[in-house]
Each structure stands twice: as structure tokens, then as C-alpha cells.
Image (tube, coloured by chain):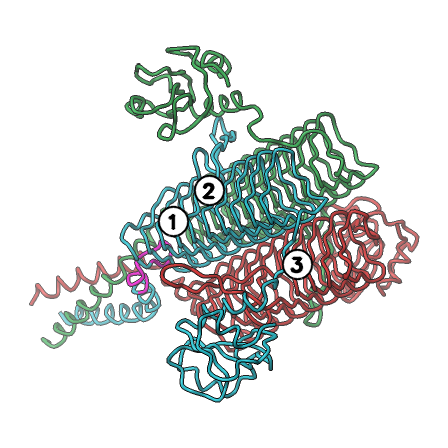
Chain colours: A cyan, B red, C green
Amino acid sequence: MKKTGEIARFIGGQLVGDDAIEIKGASGLKEAKKGDISFIIHEKFSPLLGMTKASCVVVPLTAKPCAKTVIRVADPSVSFSKAVDFIFPDRIPHPKGIHPTAVIEAKARIGANCGIGPYVVVRDGVSICDDTVIYPFCYIGKNARLGNSCIIYPGVTIREEVSLGNRVIIHPGAIIGGDGFGYDLAKGIFLKIPQIGTVVVEDDVEIGSNVTIDRARFSRTVIGAGTKIDNLVQVAHNVTIGRNCVVVAQSGISGSTKLGNGVMLGGQAGLVHHIELADGVKVGAQSGVLKSFLEKDTVLWGTPAKPIRLAKRLNASTALLPKLYARLNLLEKKIRALEKKK
Amino acid sequence: MKKTGEIARFIGGQLVGDDAIEIKGASGLKEAKKGDISFIIHEKFSPLLGMTKASCVVVPLTAKPCAKTVIRVADPSVSFSKAVDFIFPDRIPHPKGIHPTAVIEAKARIGANCGIGPYVVVRDGVSICDDTVIYPFCYIGKNARLGNSCIIYPGVTIREEVSLGNRVIIHPGAIIGGDGFGYDLAKGIFLKIPQIGTVVVEDDVEIGSNVTIDRARFSRTVIGAGTKIDNLVQVAHNVTIGRNCVVVAQSGISGSTKLGNGVMLGGQAGLVHHIELADGVKVGAQSGVLKSFLEKDTVLWGTPAKPIRLAKRLNASTALLPKLYARLNLLEKKIRALEKKK
Amino acid sequence: MKKTGEIARFIGGQLVGDDAIEIKGASGLKEAKKGDISFIIHEKFSPLLGMTKASCVVVPLTAKPCAKTVIRVADPSVSFSKAVDFIFPDRIPHPKGIHPTAVIEAKARIGANCGIGPYVVVRDGVSICDDTVIYPFCYIGKNARLGNSCIIYPGVTIREEVSLGNRVIIHPGAIIGGDGFGYDLAKGIFLKIPQIGTVVVEDDVEIGSNVTIDRARFSRTVIGAGTKIDNLVQVAHNVTIGRNCVVVAQSGISGSTKLGNGVMLGGQAGLVHHIELADGVKVGAQSGVLKSFLEKDTVLWGTPAKPIRLAKRLNASTALLPKLYARLNLLEKKIRALEKKK
């Protein structure tokens, strides 16, 4: 519990109103109760301030004056998130200390202030830096390296030699460093190709629940710094994802494909192998990208994916097909008439 | 092992034939062996009764008389399922009692007659009602609430504050209450938006293997009573699914989207965020729904999803395109001929 | 570490050059360092031999002579894989022995030389044959049978009665034998249909991370010998997959569908229920197969999937639609002109 004045100071905002209200919860404007803090992202929502039960609202600098206690800031959504972390520092009950049931092999090194929950297995040669938290049922394979302040939720498998940067968050059930899917076909039989590379996950990456990221055949599969991956995404071996990309749920990236920085993939999108998308390319949901797009910031849609203007034009053309058939029928009739007249 | 007479009484059917046959197995008509019970769902399958090796068959009231021992019931499939549960009450070897290796924190409450397997972690403040079964490697986060008679298969993660109703079944590897996928973009960097809501799963819901259901940003993601979710489905934050919906494997529902009651999503279907489907809407497999459909019982297909009559018409139009080009070529030729004659 | 001469002998190749080089690593040609072994799959890549830092390269019999130490073989990729396994026999740090924390119920039988990691649960009646390895957090249900030399990675659930052949590899988080998705609709309520069949996984199958394979309603879901399944694939109840099939990531196969031998499904492909694909059928990525294709080796693409020549023709026709409209507009104009002249 924090007071409105403390919160305003912490997020660097300007308090207008009562600085001594005790804040007990945080919520959206509609659902908010007395004692909650809430926010609006734009001054146009100012009229809603009269209707919310929230005791304090984080508002943009441009918001109109009102009777409600508000905190004025440049970016209300970002500041509200900071406020939430300030008011509820232990909101998520991470494991603390090293639980006696954790199996930590002799040559593993655990940094200061880590939380290792019950039933975690940490193999030899693993290095875990300070302030990292690992939930139950995680497997950390031989020689894996985890940076500072990572959060590894339950049931995550990080196989041998995988490397995570700092502040990486991995949600439950994600699998990092499974074997890539590679076989030689010899006389009708598939022979497994050893996958002797690894996966490198850079700083500030977040990986969703039940995501699968395969290790490279050689060298590395790379997830660039700041990239966010949603649930149930597949990243095949030797993929390179740039920095600050957003990969929405259930999309899949085939082997050796390369995404630049700031690329966005919509949900259930699929990319074939060995292609490249330039920085800032955006791929619509369910699209299937079958070739490289090397021009920055191209927006793609459809299967096969095309620049969105073209894709929408084709889509509109298709939607008009029944009318087109009608026009064609009429033309044929008219021509028959013209031909008869000769 | 139960006798045919007992079974008939239990399922409320009318036995015709021998009431003392010992039933040792249950099977489809084709695969059935001597000693098995089987069923047919319609009288038109009556001829097959002569060919099955099953010792007893559950049949509809309208089935023709035959030499085989049968049990006549109004709904053979439902009655057969009841019979299976009656004959093999311990068919699935659920854990019984509380295994000594389960880590149950001090302030958790476990109801009567629960089965908590080895290597389960139950955090403080959790409440588990009577007759609920939890398999190994499940994580039940702080303050989560599980109703009566739930079955939680291995490796399920239920994060803090999540609430399950009664008779909820969760298959292995499902993740309930992972963080929603939300970020603020500030100067090219994605900042995590705290996801401080939860997930409410109502009574009689079944959730498939490796499903992911994210917690709300605020308030709740809701799965309505009686809804059945197949494997590998993604349910994003703040989604509301109504009662008695069916969500087939690998489909995905984006943030804040709302399904009415009795909605059905085909496999690999995708719904964009912030849309609404009315009660009884059916979405075909692999369809991509890009806008709300507010008329009840609409059947949708394709990407972008359209009412199925329109979608099929467009699909048929597209399939005829090569012929259309041929017709157009012919017309152009004829017109050239007409123009020359002038 | 092995010497080039030993490696050549082991893989049955012809060494040309120095037989005493110590090989410390294996890599692609580009990434290779001094002390590495590498390979080229075709003589056309011979010019690259001058540029690699690899100390030894596995080459095809037809490769041109060069200054580099090479091993000549008939199939370089296959031979290189063999070499990797020879040089690094313990590359993957599988568990060895039976860890004291493994919970192995009294009536389970474990073969010779198995590796059972910490926190594995093996229920009564399970039979595990020799040389099989099971990683932490795996659950092996009652009466399940695992063959020789299987590798079961962390967090795999194998439910009761499931049977695996020899040399089966299952990647982390895969769920084998979850309940099939089957309900009877009675008065608007879905009643669960007991799924009393099982899953049979034959020899030499590999199953990717977080794959879900459901048990049959009756009898068995079957994965044929030598079949390889990529990550996040869904296999529904009563599916039969033939031998030596390849099922790429995130594809889904609906209930009771049957694949012949040597079938290939591209990523995110979907197959409806109760259809059949003949031996050697290939389905393109993201395709939706809505009916059976019984002609061998048919290549399918699109939704609804069609033989690829037809699918590509339709796709090309669609891409030309804007031009078609232009042609049609012109025709209509010309006809108006012709009509006026009368």
C-alpha cells in the first residue's frame, strides 16, 4: 500500500489533489473500486474521470482539470505500469532462496540473491547470474548460461549450452534448445542429422508459454535483444530474429530464416525457410511468407504474402467475382446478339 | 467386471437377452472381442450386429430384434459412456492421497479425498476442494482456487490467483494464467505492461494438452461453464468465452475478443482482437475472423471469414477462374472480328 | 577428440591428406575453426574448400583434388553425421543410472543400462527396456511400455497404456496419450466420451517439443515406424500415420484421418477428420486438406488443398484479377460502341 503523494514522486508525475490517499489496488477505469489507481491514455477520455470509482488516475499532461485526484505524466500507460510495480513490488510470488529439493549439480554456479524453487534441476557447468528466479520443474541443461534478473516460470526446459542474457522472462512450458528438425533421406529412411549448435537469447527478451525454439545445426539460433515472443510460437533451427521484434501467438518461423530489427509477425503467420525480412517488416495474421522481402517496413498480408495494398486489391477483386461473372454473361449475350445481326 | 444385467440397470436400459454375461472390455463394433460391450448409434447399423464379436451391444430403442444380447436405450452413445465409467471405475489410475514429496505450503487448504501426486507444488493461500486430483509436476500458484472433483494432469501450471470451478479437467502441459502479451512502445523499446488480472475457468470446462490461457491485464479472462477446449489452443488476455463452446485444436483467440454461448471454432481458426461472435456462431477450420459477427448461429468460413454461403460462392468462383479467362479470350477475339467487319 | 585417420576408418571413407590431425569440433564450412571437421554435399562446392578454416572436410567421391585434408565418401551429409556421433559420443549429457529421487512404483520394470533422471515418476506396470534414457519431470503412466534405446527429454507425459517402440526420441513437453476430444451433445450440454484406446508409437519415431498426440476412443492412434514429427504438432484420436512420414511444425491432423507411408505435411498444414492420404502425398505449408487424396505422390497446396499444378494456376489467375477487370471494362466499352453503330 502506498500513498498518492509517494506514487507521484516515484513515477515523476505532478499530483493534483489529495496526496494522502492510500492506494490498495490498480485497475482499468471501468472496473476500478475505491482505493484503486487507474489511468487514461489520452485527454479525450477525460469525461470518463467523472464516472470511475478509482481514487486516483494517472492522466496525460493535456488532460482537463477535474475534481478527481490525478497524477499528470507524459506517458500515462508507461507511468501506470511503473506505479503498479512500485505499489505491489511482490505482486508475483517468485521463489526465494534455494529450495532444498532443487538438484543442483556440483559444478553449477548460482549467483547472489537467486530464487530457485522446489524440484528444479540444474546440471553441471551451468552458470546463473544474480537475482535470477527459477520456478519448479525447470530443467537447466549442462553448461547453460543465464544472465541477471531472469524469470523462468514452471516447467521450462533449457537444454545444454543455451545462453540467456539479462532480464529474460520465459513463461511456463517453453522449450529452448530442442534439436532442430533435420534428416538425411537415405534409401527411403530418414537419418537424424546431429544438431550441434545452440540457442542464444539476448537481453530483455520475453518468451511465451509453450514456445519452442530449436538449437542450430551448427552455430546458433538467435533471439535479438528486446524481442517479445507470444505463446505457442515455433522458431526452427538456425533462425535469426533481430532486436525489438514482436512475434504473435502460434506463428512459426522455418529453418535459417532471418528477421531484421523491429519485425512484427501476426498470429498464426508462417515463414518458409531460408528467407529474409528487412527491418520493420510487418506480416499480417495467418499470412504465409514464401519469399524474402528486403525493403524496410513493408507490410505484408495473405498467402502467398504480398504487400498489403496489392493483397487487399486482390482480396477485393476476389470478393467481386460473382459480379464479374454476371458482367461476363451479359457481354456474351450482347455479342451473340451483335453477331446475329450481321 | 460387471454383468450385463447390472449394466442395463445402471444405465436405465432394457436388456434383451442374457443378463449374466461378464463384461471385461468396451470397444467399437469392429474391434470388439468376446466379453466386450459395444454400441450402435442408429438402427441403420443393425445389420452389423450379426458380425461383431461383442458379447453385448447398446442399441437405440428403434433397433430391430436380433440374436445378440442388447441393451435398448434412448441415446446409445451417452449410455455407452455411462456404462464404461460404471464397468471400469478406476480405468484412469489417478493419484490417491497426498504423496509425501508434494510441497504444500503452510497456508494452503486441501479438501477431503483429494489425490495429490508426487512432486506437486501448492503455494500458500491455495484452496483445493474435495475429490480433486492433481498429477505430478503441477504447479498451483499462490491463492489459486480449485473446485470439487477437478482432474489436473501432469505438468500443468496454474498461476497465482487463478480460479477453477468444479469438475474442471486440465490435460498435461496446459498453462493457465500466464502473463498476457502486452507492451508499451517507448522510443523503439517494448516495455512490459503488468498483467494484474486473472483467469476464471467455470464449472465443467475441459482444457486440452499444452493449451495456453493468459491472465487479463485487469479483471479476468473467462472460460464459460461447459466449454471444451482442444489441444494447443491459444486464449489471449481478457478474452471471454461463453458457455458450452467448442474450441478445436490449434485455434487462437486474440486479446479482449468475446465469444457468446455455444460458439464453435474449427481447428487452426484465428480470431483477431476486440471482436465479438454471437451465440451459436460456427467458424470453419483455418478461418481468419477479422470482424464481429453479431447475428446468432452464423456459419463462417475462409480468410477473411464470411458467411459460408458467400465464402463457398467465392471459392467456387475462384475455382472457375481458368475457364473465365478462356471465355474472356474468346470474347475479345469475337469483338475484334466484329470490329473488323465494320 | 579423434584423429582424422580414425574418423575416416569409422565412416568408411578414403582419407586424402594428413591422417593425424586432432579433430576437436564439427561445424559448417563457413563457421569452422582450425581443428574442426566439416563437409560439402556436392562437388560444385569444391571451390569453398580453399576458404574454410576447417582442418578436414568430408567430401563426395566426385570432389576435385585439393590441398585440404579430405575424407571421400558416397554420401557426405550422412557420413558427417556419423563422424559427429563418433567424435562426440557423449555430446548430449543424458542422465545415467537411476536417480534416488525418481519415484518408481513397485511393479514397474526397468531394463539394463537405463538412465532415469531426478524427479521422474514411473507408475505400476510400466516396462522400460534397456538403454532407455528418461529426463527429469517425465511422467510414465500405468502399464506404458517403452522399447530399447529411447530418449525421453524433460517434462514429457506418457499416459497409461501407451506403447513406444525402440529408438524413439521424444522432445521436451510432448504429451502422448491425452484424452481424445470427443463429446456427445445432449440438450445443449457436452458430455465427455471416455477415450479408452491408446497410442502406439513404432520404432525410430522422433516427436518434437510440445507435440500432442491423443489416445484413441477405442483401439489405437498409430505413429508408424521411422516417422518424424516436428514441434507443436497436433495428432487427434484414432489418427494413423504411416511409416517414414514427415510432419512439419504446427500442423494438425484431425480425428480418424489416415496417412499412408512417406507422406509429408508442411508447416501449419491442417487435415480434416476421416480422410485418407495415399503413400507419398505431399501437402504444402498452411494448406487445408478437406477431402481424401488416394493417388500416390500427389502434391497438394492451398485451402481447400488441390493438386499443386491446379492450385498454382488458380493462384496465378487470382493474381491477374486486376488485369482481368481492366480487360472486361475495355470489352464493355467496345461493345457499347458496336451497339451504337447499329
Callout 2 crowding tier (Cα within 10 Å): few <14, some 14–19, many ≥20: many
**Does B80 sit above or below residue A136?**
below
**Does B295 sit above or below residue C1?**
below
For the residue labelled by badge 1, is the local secondary structure a helix, a strand or a loop?
A: loop
Q: Quadrant of residue C138?
A: top right
Instruction: Judge whether residue B63 can be spotted in this image.
Output: no
- Disc 1/disc 2 C-alpha distance (Å): 12 Å
- Label drawn at residue B271: none
- Asked whether the residues under marks 3 and 2 belong to the same chain, the reply is no
Residue A241 rendering spot, x and y as whole percentages? 40, 48
Residue A326 rendering spot, x and y as whole percentages? 30, 71
Q: Do the residues labelled 3 and 2 touch (CB within 8 Å)?
A: no
For the residue labelled by badge 3, is the local secondary structure a helix, a strand or a loop?
A: strand
- The residue marked by circle 3 belongs to what chain? B
Callout 3 crowding tier (Cα within 10 Å): few <14, some 14–19, many ≥20: many
- Asked whether the residues under marks 3 and 1 belong to the same chain, the reply is no
Q: Which quadrant is home to the N terminus of chain A?
A: bottom right
Q: In which quarter of the image is residue A340?
A: bottom left
Mark 1 or mark 2: name the one nearer the start of the chain: 2
- Label drawn at residue A242: 1
- Foreground of the two, B311 or C167: C167
Q: Name the residue under label 2.
A: A200
Q: In this view, does C159 lie to the left or right of A321?
A: right
Q: Is residue B245 rendered magenta in the image? A: no
Q: In which quarter of the image is residue B208?
A: bottom right
For the residue labelled by badge 2, is the local secondary structure a helix, a strand or a loop?
A: strand
Q: Name the residue under label 3.
A: B158
Which one is in front in this view, the residue at disc 3 or the one at disc 2?
2
Q: Which amino acid does label 1 sit on?
A: Gly
Magenta segment, which residues?
A300-312
Q: Is residue A301 rendered magenta in the image? A: yes
Q: What residue type is labelled 2?
A: Val
